[in-house]
Image (cartoon, helix red, strand yellow):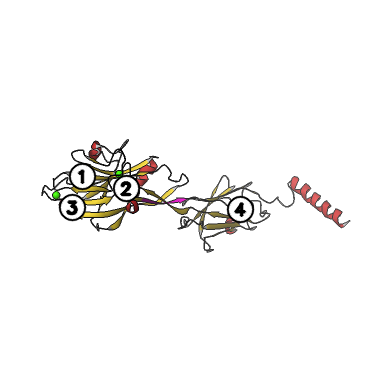
Amino acid sequence: MKRLRYGGILALLGFLVACGGGPAAPPQIVAAYPADGARGVRKNEAIVVTFDRSMDRSATEAAFSLWDPDGKPLSVQFAWEDGDRRMRVTPSQPWRYSDTDQPVYYRYRLSTGAKSAGGAPLAQAFEARFATLRKLEWKKTSSPVLDGAVSDLGYVNNDPSGATAYILAYVGDFASNRALRAFFVFELGDFPPEAVELDQARLRVWLKAKYGSPEADLGSLSLARVDLGAGLDKDDYQAPALGNPLEISPGWVVGAWRELDVSPLFAAAWGEDADRLDLRFAFEVASDWDSAADRLDLATGEYATYAPELVVRYYAP
Ligand SMILES: [Ca+2]
Ligand SMILES: [Ca+2]
Protein backbone atom coordinates (compact mmCIF):
# COMPACT_ATOMS: atom_id res chain seq x y z
CA MET A 1 0.00 0.00 0.00
CA LYS A 2 2.81 2.35 0.99
CA ARG A 3 4.70 1.53 -2.19
CA LEU A 4 1.69 2.30 -4.33
CA ARG A 5 1.23 5.68 -2.73
CA TYR A 6 4.91 6.57 -3.35
CA GLY A 7 4.50 5.65 -7.02
CA GLY A 8 1.48 7.85 -7.14
CA ILE A 9 3.42 10.83 -5.83
CA LEU A 10 6.14 10.32 -8.43
CA ALA A 11 3.53 10.16 -11.16
CA LEU A 12 2.00 13.37 -9.88
CA LEU A 13 5.41 15.09 -9.82
CA GLY A 14 6.06 13.94 -13.37
CA PHE A 15 2.69 15.31 -14.40
CA LEU A 16 3.40 18.68 -12.78
CA VAL A 17 6.81 18.92 -14.50
CA ALA A 18 5.30 17.96 -17.85
CA CYS A 19 2.72 20.70 -17.46
CA GLY A 20 5.39 23.26 -16.64
CA GLY A 21 3.96 23.84 -13.20
CA GLY A 22 5.53 22.95 -9.84
CA PRO A 23 9.29 22.45 -9.38
CA ALA A 24 11.38 22.67 -12.54
CA ALA A 25 13.27 19.55 -13.68
CA PRO A 26 16.95 19.44 -12.65
CA PRO A 27 19.41 20.63 -15.28
CA GLN A 28 21.48 17.97 -16.99
CA ILE A 29 25.15 18.07 -17.93
CA VAL A 30 25.21 17.04 -21.58
CA ALA A 31 29.00 17.29 -22.05
CA ALA A 32 32.04 17.88 -19.90
CA TYR A 33 35.56 18.45 -21.17
CA PRO A 34 38.00 17.07 -20.11
CA ALA A 35 35.92 13.97 -19.54
CA ASP A 36 36.51 11.89 -16.44
CA GLY A 37 39.64 9.78 -17.07
CA ALA A 38 40.88 11.95 -19.97
CA ARG A 39 44.64 12.00 -20.56
CA GLY A 40 47.04 14.30 -22.33
CA VAL A 41 45.28 17.60 -21.63
CA ARG A 42 47.40 20.47 -22.98
CA LYS A 43 48.61 23.55 -21.09
CA ASN A 44 46.06 26.12 -22.15
CA GLU A 45 42.93 24.07 -22.62
CA ALA A 46 39.83 25.15 -20.70
CA ILE A 47 37.32 23.06 -18.80
CA VAL A 48 34.02 23.27 -20.65
CA VAL A 49 30.75 22.09 -19.12
CA THR A 50 27.65 22.11 -21.29
CA PHE A 51 24.16 21.99 -19.80
CA ASP A 52 20.81 21.23 -21.40
CA ARG A 53 19.43 24.60 -20.37
CA SER A 54 20.44 28.08 -19.27
CA MET A 55 22.09 28.17 -15.88
CA ASP A 56 22.18 30.54 -12.97
CA ARG A 57 25.69 31.91 -13.37
CA SER A 58 26.55 32.84 -9.81
CA ALA A 59 25.09 29.68 -8.21
CA THR A 60 26.85 27.45 -10.74
CA GLU A 61 30.18 29.25 -10.45
CA ALA A 62 29.98 28.99 -6.66
CA ALA A 63 29.33 25.24 -6.97
CA PHE A 64 32.50 24.68 -9.01
CA SER A 65 35.77 23.48 -7.46
CA LEU A 66 39.12 22.59 -8.98
CA TRP A 67 42.11 20.87 -7.35
CA ASP A 68 45.69 20.63 -8.57
CA PRO A 69 47.67 17.33 -8.56
CA ASP A 70 48.64 17.98 -4.92
CA GLY A 71 44.99 18.35 -3.93
CA LYS A 72 45.28 22.13 -3.50
CA PRO A 73 42.22 24.18 -4.59
CA LEU A 74 42.87 26.41 -7.58
CA SER A 75 41.29 29.72 -8.47
CA VAL A 76 39.63 29.97 -11.85
CA GLN A 77 37.92 32.38 -14.20
CA PHE A 78 34.52 31.73 -15.73
CA ALA A 79 33.06 32.62 -19.10
CA TRP A 80 29.56 31.80 -20.27
CA GLU A 81 28.47 30.98 -23.80
CA ASP A 82 25.44 29.85 -25.75
CA GLY A 83 22.85 31.68 -23.64
CA ASP A 84 24.44 30.52 -20.36
CA ARG A 85 24.20 26.87 -21.38
CA ARG A 86 27.97 26.48 -21.58
CA MET A 87 30.45 27.33 -18.85
CA ARG A 88 34.10 27.75 -19.76
CA VAL A 89 36.53 27.52 -16.86
CA THR A 90 40.11 28.74 -17.13
CA PRO A 91 42.59 28.09 -14.34
CA SER A 92 44.65 31.03 -13.06
CA GLN A 93 47.80 29.29 -14.33
CA PRO A 94 48.30 26.80 -17.17
CA TRP A 95 48.01 23.12 -16.29
CA ARG A 96 51.20 21.59 -15.02
CA TYR A 97 52.71 18.69 -16.94
CA SER A 98 54.24 15.66 -15.29
CA ASP A 99 58.03 15.72 -14.98
CA THR A 100 58.11 11.94 -15.24
CA ASP A 101 56.44 9.17 -17.23
CA GLN A 102 53.73 8.98 -14.56
CA PRO A 103 50.74 11.27 -15.21
CA VAL A 104 49.61 13.95 -12.77
CA TYR A 105 45.89 14.42 -12.23
CA TYR A 106 43.66 17.44 -11.80
CA ARG A 107 40.15 17.09 -10.43
CA TYR A 108 37.09 19.30 -10.79
CA ARG A 109 33.66 19.09 -9.27
CA LEU A 110 30.30 20.69 -9.67
CA SER A 111 28.15 20.31 -6.56
CA THR A 112 24.37 20.28 -6.40
CA GLY A 113 24.61 23.98 -5.59
CA ALA A 114 24.66 24.49 -9.38
CA LYS A 115 21.24 25.70 -10.50
CA SER A 116 19.38 26.28 -13.71
CA ALA A 117 18.22 29.81 -14.49
CA GLY A 118 14.82 28.57 -13.35
CA GLY A 119 16.25 27.71 -9.92
CA ALA A 120 16.40 23.89 -10.18
CA PRO A 121 19.54 22.37 -8.68
CA LEU A 122 21.70 19.75 -10.35
CA ALA A 123 20.27 16.32 -9.40
CA GLN A 124 23.68 15.04 -8.37
CA ALA A 125 27.20 16.32 -8.08
CA PHE A 126 29.47 15.84 -11.06
CA GLU A 127 33.15 15.03 -10.69
CA ALA A 128 35.94 14.36 -13.19
CA ARG A 129 39.66 13.63 -12.96
CA PHE A 130 41.98 14.19 -15.88
CA ALA A 131 45.69 13.92 -16.60
CA THR A 132 47.96 16.34 -18.44
CA LEU A 133 50.98 15.40 -20.55
CA ARG A 134 53.79 13.18 -19.27
CA LYS A 135 57.49 13.73 -19.90
CA LEU A 136 59.22 10.91 -21.76
CA GLU A 137 62.65 10.41 -23.27
CA TRP A 138 63.81 9.04 -26.60
CA LYS A 139 67.42 8.44 -27.62
CA LYS A 140 69.09 7.78 -30.90
CA THR A 141 72.70 7.04 -31.83
CA SER A 142 74.24 8.78 -34.82
CA SER A 143 73.94 6.64 -37.95
CA PRO A 144 77.46 5.27 -38.68
CA VAL A 145 76.68 4.75 -42.35
CA LEU A 146 76.03 8.46 -42.79
CA ASP A 147 78.14 10.38 -40.28
CA GLY A 148 81.76 11.43 -40.73
CA ALA A 149 83.69 14.41 -42.07
CA VAL A 150 84.21 16.13 -45.43
CA SER A 151 87.18 18.29 -46.40
CA ASP A 152 87.20 21.51 -48.40
CA LEU A 153 88.72 19.47 -51.25
CA GLY A 154 85.76 17.12 -51.14
CA TYR A 155 87.45 14.18 -49.47
CA VAL A 156 84.89 12.14 -47.52
CA ASN A 157 86.02 10.57 -44.24
CA ASN A 158 83.52 7.75 -44.18
CA ASP A 159 84.03 4.41 -45.81
CA PRO A 160 81.32 4.23 -48.46
CA SER A 161 81.45 0.44 -48.69
CA GLY A 162 81.42 -0.52 -45.03
CA ALA A 163 81.13 2.81 -43.25
CA THR A 164 83.10 1.46 -40.33
CA ALA A 165 86.55 2.86 -41.04
CA TYR A 166 86.17 6.27 -39.43
CA ILE A 167 85.53 6.36 -35.73
CA LEU A 168 86.26 10.10 -35.67
CA ALA A 169 84.81 13.12 -37.42
CA TYR A 170 87.08 16.14 -37.64
CA VAL A 171 86.22 19.81 -37.51
CA GLY A 172 88.97 22.38 -38.03
CA ASP A 173 92.16 22.12 -40.05
CA PHE A 174 95.08 19.75 -40.56
CA ALA A 175 98.82 20.51 -40.86
CA SER A 176 98.21 20.52 -44.62
CA ASN A 177 95.96 23.56 -44.04
CA ARG A 178 93.05 21.55 -45.42
CA ALA A 179 89.75 22.23 -43.65
CA LEU A 180 87.20 19.69 -42.45
CA ARG A 181 83.66 19.75 -41.20
CA ALA A 182 82.01 17.07 -39.07
CA PHE A 183 78.60 15.51 -39.67
CA PHE A 184 76.24 13.57 -37.42
CA VAL A 185 73.01 12.00 -38.61
CA PHE A 186 70.05 10.83 -36.57
CA GLU A 187 67.24 8.75 -38.04
CA LEU A 188 63.92 10.08 -36.76
CA GLY A 189 61.72 7.33 -38.20
CA ASP A 190 60.98 5.78 -34.83
CA PHE A 191 60.51 9.01 -32.91
CA PRO A 192 57.24 8.33 -31.03
CA PRO A 193 54.22 9.55 -33.01
CA GLU A 194 52.34 10.21 -29.76
CA ALA A 195 54.76 13.03 -28.87
CA VAL A 196 52.90 16.35 -28.91
CA GLU A 197 55.31 18.85 -27.38
CA LEU A 198 59.08 19.13 -27.13
CA ASP A 199 60.78 19.70 -23.81
CA GLN A 200 64.40 19.63 -24.95
CA ALA A 201 66.62 17.93 -27.52
CA ARG A 202 70.28 17.48 -26.63
CA LEU A 203 73.21 16.32 -28.66
CA ARG A 204 75.84 14.37 -26.71
CA VAL A 205 79.23 14.17 -28.37
CA TRP A 206 82.53 12.75 -27.16
CA LEU A 207 85.70 14.76 -27.76
CA LYS A 208 88.43 12.21 -28.37
CA ALA A 209 91.25 14.65 -29.10
CA LYS A 210 91.99 18.29 -29.70
CA TYR A 211 94.91 19.71 -31.71
CA GLY A 212 96.20 23.26 -31.58
CA SER A 213 93.70 25.96 -30.65
CA PRO A 214 90.76 25.81 -33.07
CA GLU A 215 88.43 27.83 -30.85
CA ALA A 216 90.88 30.72 -30.69
CA ASP A 217 92.15 30.57 -34.27
CA LEU A 218 89.21 29.52 -36.45
CA GLY A 219 86.45 31.89 -35.34
CA SER A 220 83.11 30.71 -34.02
CA LEU A 221 81.96 27.12 -34.17
CA SER A 222 78.48 26.59 -35.57
CA LEU A 223 76.15 23.64 -35.62
CA ALA A 224 73.78 23.68 -38.57
CA ARG A 225 70.97 21.50 -39.72
CA VAL A 226 71.68 20.42 -43.30
CA ASP A 227 70.33 17.90 -45.79
CA LEU A 228 72.91 15.30 -46.81
CA GLY A 229 70.57 13.71 -49.32
CA ALA A 230 71.32 10.04 -50.03
CA GLY A 231 74.58 10.08 -48.08
CA LEU A 232 77.69 11.98 -47.09
CA ASP A 233 79.48 13.20 -50.22
CA LYS A 234 81.98 15.85 -51.34
CA ASP A 235 79.33 18.56 -51.79
CA ASP A 236 78.16 18.37 -48.20
CA TYR A 237 81.07 20.51 -46.97
CA GLN A 238 79.14 23.38 -48.57
CA ALA A 239 75.58 22.12 -48.00
CA PRO A 240 73.36 25.11 -47.21
CA ALA A 241 72.17 25.42 -43.62
CA LEU A 242 68.45 24.83 -43.11
CA GLY A 243 67.37 27.62 -40.78
CA ASN A 244 69.68 29.41 -38.39
CA PRO A 245 72.73 27.50 -37.20
CA LEU A 246 73.47 27.40 -33.48
CA GLU A 247 76.61 29.02 -32.21
CA ILE A 248 78.55 26.64 -29.98
CA SER A 249 80.46 28.27 -27.16
CA PRO A 250 84.03 27.17 -26.34
CA GLY A 251 84.35 24.66 -23.54
CA TRP A 252 85.43 21.39 -25.10
CA VAL A 253 87.24 18.98 -22.80
CA VAL A 254 89.28 16.13 -24.23
CA GLY A 255 88.05 12.71 -23.11
CA ALA A 256 84.65 14.03 -22.04
CA TRP A 257 81.08 14.23 -23.26
CA ARG A 258 79.70 17.59 -24.27
CA GLU A 259 75.96 18.11 -24.18
CA LEU A 260 74.52 20.73 -26.47
CA ASP A 261 70.96 21.99 -26.52
CA VAL A 262 69.85 21.45 -30.11
CA SER A 263 66.13 21.98 -29.49
CA PRO A 264 65.58 24.50 -32.33
CA LEU A 265 67.26 22.20 -34.86
CA PHE A 266 65.33 19.14 -33.75
CA ALA A 267 62.06 21.09 -33.55
CA ALA A 268 62.48 22.26 -37.15
CA ALA A 269 63.09 18.71 -38.41
CA TRP A 270 60.22 17.32 -36.33
CA GLY A 271 57.92 20.11 -37.51
CA GLU A 272 58.66 19.18 -41.12
CA ASP A 273 58.14 15.50 -40.36
CA ALA A 274 61.68 14.93 -41.67
CA ASP A 275 62.92 11.36 -41.50
CA ARG A 276 66.41 12.47 -40.40
CA LEU A 277 68.21 15.17 -38.49
CA ASP A 278 71.48 15.88 -40.33
CA LEU A 279 73.88 18.09 -38.36
CA ARG A 280 77.14 19.74 -39.33
CA PHE A 281 79.83 21.31 -37.17
CA ALA A 282 81.86 23.98 -38.95
CA PHE A 283 84.30 26.67 -37.89
CA GLU A 284 83.80 30.12 -39.32
CA VAL A 285 87.34 30.16 -40.74
CA ALA A 286 88.36 27.17 -42.87
CA SER A 287 92.07 27.30 -41.96
CA ASP A 288 94.46 29.75 -40.30
CA TRP A 289 97.24 28.55 -42.67
CA ASP A 290 99.75 28.07 -39.87
CA SER A 291 100.60 24.59 -41.20
CA ALA A 292 99.66 23.13 -37.84
CA ALA A 293 96.50 21.23 -36.97
CA ASP A 294 93.77 23.15 -35.15
CA ARG A 295 90.85 20.85 -34.77
CA LEU A 296 88.42 18.84 -32.68
CA ASP A 297 88.21 15.09 -33.19
CA LEU A 298 84.72 13.92 -32.31
CA ALA A 299 83.59 10.31 -31.98
CA THR A 300 81.25 9.07 -34.71
CA GLY A 301 78.55 6.40 -34.72
CA GLU A 302 81.28 3.85 -35.38
CA TYR A 303 82.91 4.52 -32.01
CA ALA A 304 81.04 1.91 -29.93
CA THR A 305 80.63 3.31 -26.40
CA TYR A 306 81.33 6.92 -27.43
CA ALA A 307 78.88 7.13 -30.32
CA PRO A 308 77.06 10.50 -30.44
CA GLU A 309 73.57 10.51 -29.12
CA LEU A 310 70.48 12.60 -29.66
CA VAL A 311 68.45 12.69 -26.44
CA VAL A 312 64.96 14.08 -26.83
CA ARG A 313 62.70 14.76 -23.88
CA TYR A 314 59.14 15.21 -25.06
CA TYR A 315 55.61 15.37 -23.76
CA ALA A 316 52.93 12.84 -24.63
CA PRO A 317 49.55 11.76 -23.24
CA1 LIG B 1 80.47 7.18 -40.21
CA1 LIG C 1 95.88 25.39 -38.52
Circle 4 residue: 56
Main secondary structure found in the magenta portion? strand
Task: Work out how far the residue at label 4 is from the one at label 1, CA to CA, in angstroms.
Answer: 72 Å
What kind of element bears circle 3?
helix
| Distance in Å between CA atoms under marks 3 and 1 | 12 Å
Amino acid at dot 2: Glu
Give how far across and how far down residue 111 sits, in percent.
63, 58
Residue wearing tag 1: 180
* Disc 1 residue crowd, few under 14, some 14–19, many 20+, Cα 10 Å: many
Q: Considering only order in the chain, which callout, 1 or 3, is on the residue closer to the N terminus?
A: 1
Which circle marks residue 214 in the picture? 3
Is residue 37 a member of the stretch shown in magenta? no
Residue 302 shows which numbered tag? 2
Q: Residues within 10 Å of mark 4 (few under 14, many from 20)?
A: some
Q: Could you tell me the amino acid type at mark 3?
A: Pro
Quadrant occupied by the N terminus: bottom right
Mark 4 lies within 8 Å of ligand 1 (Cβ measured):
no
Q: Are marks 4 and 3 in contact (CB under 8 Å)?
A: no
Locate residue 181, reporting x and y percent. 23, 45
- Of the two numbered discs 3 and 1 in the rendering, the one whose residue sits closer to the viewer: 1
